[in-house]
Image (cartoon, grey):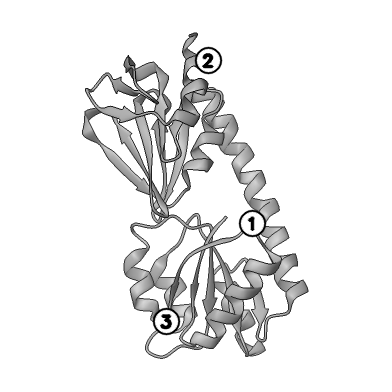
Amino acid sequence: MNAIIIDDEVSCIESLLAKIELFTPSVKVIKTYLVPQEALRDLDRIDVDVIFLDVEMPNMNGITFAQKANLTTTEIIYTTAYQKYAIDAFRVCAFDFLLKPIDRKELVSSIEKLNQKLQEKNLKHSRLQAKYNKITVHTPKGMLFVPIHDILWIESDNSYSKLHLLENQIITTSRSIGDFEEMLLAYDFCRIHHSTIINLQHLQEYVRGEGGSVVLTNGTELDVSRRRKADLMNLIGF
C-alpha cells in the first residue's frame, strides 16, 4: 500500500513515519510534504492508495486540499489534534480520522480496515484482468486499463516503475516492480533482472553470455542477470 503524508509540522511527520514503519509494515510511505500545495502539484504523477492528511495547516488546510484534489481512487486518513474537524472531514469522503497524538492501536485498526477495502477492490480488478486481459494502473484522475499484450517490458526506476508499451508509449507509476511481477505471473511475463520484467510474447532473441541478454520485438536489448537466467531458460523451454 503506497502512502504520502502531508503535515506542516516536521515532528508530526517523523512521529507518524516511525509508527507506520513499526506497526503497519504493509504501508510504504513514498513521500512526505510540509506544504500541501506541493503535494497537489505532484498528484498528477504519483500513484498512492492513501494520504495521511493534516487538517490545520497555513494557506491551505486539509479539507480544502481534499476538495481541490478531487480524488477518485485514493483514500484520505485525516490526522489532527482537533476533534471538531471530524464532521467536515467526513463530508469530503474521508476514509478515517485519527486524533493526534496518534494512538498505535487506532492506526493499526485503520490500516487493517483499509487493507480489507483494497483487497476487495483488487479482487474486482483481478476479475477484469482475467476477463479482458487488461491490467489497471491507477492515476490521480482515475484508472488506465492497459492491454497486457501491449506491454513490452517493465523497469524499476527508484521508487517508481515504468511500463514500456507498443508505439513507444511509457506509463510511469509508483507501483513497485514486485507488484507487477505478482500481477502478471499468469501471463507469460518473466523477471530477468531485479529491475526488469519482460513480456515473453515480445521476446525475439536471446544472446548468450554470463547472464546474457534478450532482444524484444521492438529492438530493445535488455540484460539478464546470472541469478535470473535459469528462470528465463525454464520458461522458454531450454
Outermost residue to the front: 210
Q: Nearer the viewer, residue 216 or 45?
A: 216
- In the displayed structure image, the side of residue 104 where residue 221 appears, left or right: left
Judge depth for marks 2 and 3 and give the one in front: 2
Image point 30% across, 32% down: which residue?
Answer: 165
For marks 3 and 1, give the CA distance: 23 Å
Image height of 34 relative to 114, above or below: below
Judge depth for marks 2 and 1 and give the one in front: 2
Image point 53% across, 42% down: which residue?
Answer: 179
Q: Helix, strand, or loop for circle 1? A: loop
The residue that label 1 is drawn on is 26
For marks 2 and 3, give the CA distance: 49 Å
The residue that label 2 is drawn on is 234
- In the displayed structure image, the side of residue 1 where residue 112 appears, left or right: right
What amino acid type is highlighted by mark number 2? Asn
x, y percent for residue 57: 46, 88
Q: Which mark is residue 34?
A: 3
Q: Which mark is residue 104?
A: none
What amino acid type is highlighted by mark number 1? Ser
Q: Say whether disc 3 or disc 1 marks the residue closer to the N-terminus.
A: 1
Image height of 237 relative to 67, above or below: above
x, y percent for residue 113: 71, 59
Image height of 90 relative to 157, above or below: below
What amino acid type is highlighted by mark number 3? Leu
- In the displayed structure image, the side of residue 18 where residue 56 appears, left or right: left
